[in-house]
Image (spheres, grey):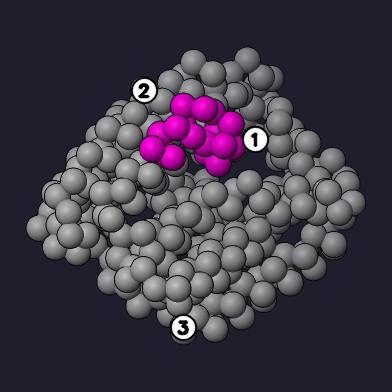
Amino acid sequence: MLIDFLKLCRPHQYLKNAFVLVGLIFGGDGSLGLFLRAAVAFVAFSAIASAVYIGNDILDVEADRRHPTKRNRPIARGAVSVGAAWRLAAALALFALALAAALSPLAALLIFAYALLNVGYSWRWKQVVIVDVFIISAGFMLRLLTGTLGLGIPPSTWLLLCGFMLTLFLGFAKRRSEMLALEGAETERAASTRRVLDDYSPAMIEQFMSITAACAVISYSLYTVAPETIARQHTQKLILTVPFVVYGIFRYLYLLHRERRGSDTARDLLTDPHMLFACAGWAALTLAVRL
């Protein structure tokens, strides 16, 4: 049962909370105190994210039981009761808010806003075409803001724009992956899994992905050469990291279309050697040019 509770929390998804560390990487002063505060923010967001995942699994249990892969989740297959899942979600949410409040009132407010955003998403917004992906993106942006404004670090507007476009791209890629996963499934089962997919078409999502991917690359590229970035990072070489970003996006598109991945971004990043190389190369070069 402990393993099922751990699966319910989806710890591999904590990789998404790396957005909380953006402020530390691009705007931090390198102090141990800031590093520890960023680590606390990461743990707090991981806890609230797990609470949200559990809540979503509870609300989506019937749809998950009809899904080709989600039916194996602990609640959907009956390994964890709904009551036990609710208690775990509440404990994690309270823990997250307590940690965030210890950082700053704004950090606590942002994490609380993330929880409310996901309540709205589960209740209604996930069935509204395009809005559903914007809500997913907003969740990532709240992570980014918690790691910047929540820690007293002013975020770069270019970096915020890049994060927004990148997360929109990942959101639309997730919807495309869901459509691919349901191809060939029974009509009734496919229709009941996620109704918003009926309002999308493959061509439409491909266009959305192309636009947001291009905007993400352009905005990040402009961020690396912006005068404020050069002044803050004390280097003009951050532009050297752009090829890793471009390669990572291209590889993700390859995985989506050739291997039908994309429904679980964190798992794709952790299991594909090319994605690991792109992320590790970007991180290593980013730190190297700042030294």
Q: CA distance from mark 1 to mark 2?
A: 21 Å
Q: Report which residue position mark 3 lands on.
A: 104
Query: Which three-letter amino acid code belongs to the residue tagged 2?
Result: Ala
Dot 2: few (<14), some (14–19), or many (≥20) neighbours within 10 Å? few
Q: Is residue 197 magenta?
A: no
Residue 60 visible in the picture: yes
Does the CB distance between marks 3 and 1 fall below 8 Å?
A: no
Which residue is pictured at 59% across the width and 24% down the height? 181
Judge from the rendering whether residue 196 lies leftward or rightward of residue 283; answer left or right. Answer: right
Q: Position of residue 250 (x, y in %)?
A: 36, 26
Q: Residue at x 36, y 59 (%)?
A: 25
Residue 191, quarter of picture: top right
Q: Secondary structure at mark 1?
A: helix
| Residue at mark 2 | 203
Amino acid type at image mark 3: Ser
Q: Nearer the viewer, residue 78 or 286?
A: 286
Please state which of the two labelled residues, at mark 3 or mark 2, is closer to the viewer.
3
Residue 22 percent location from the top left of the image? 38, 59
Q: Is 236 located above or below residue 205 in the figure?
A: below
Q: Which percent across, then down, holds residue 16?
A: 51, 50
Is the residue marked by circle 1 packed among few (<14), some (14-19), or many (20+) residues within 10 Å?
A: many
Magenta stretch, overall SS: helix
Where, by quadrant of the figure, is residue 221 drawn?
Answer: top left
**Extent of the magenta region:** 264-281
Image height of 236 relative to 36, above or below: above
Q: Is residue 212 left or right of residue 11?
A: left
Rounded to the nearest angstrom, the CA distance separating label 3 from label 1 is: 40 Å
Residue linked to disc 1? 193
The percent coordinates of residue 205 (x first, y second) are 38, 30
Residue at 27%, 40% in the rendered image:
241
Q: Are marks 3 and 2 in contact (CB under 8 Å)?
A: no
Tag in front: 3 or 1: 3
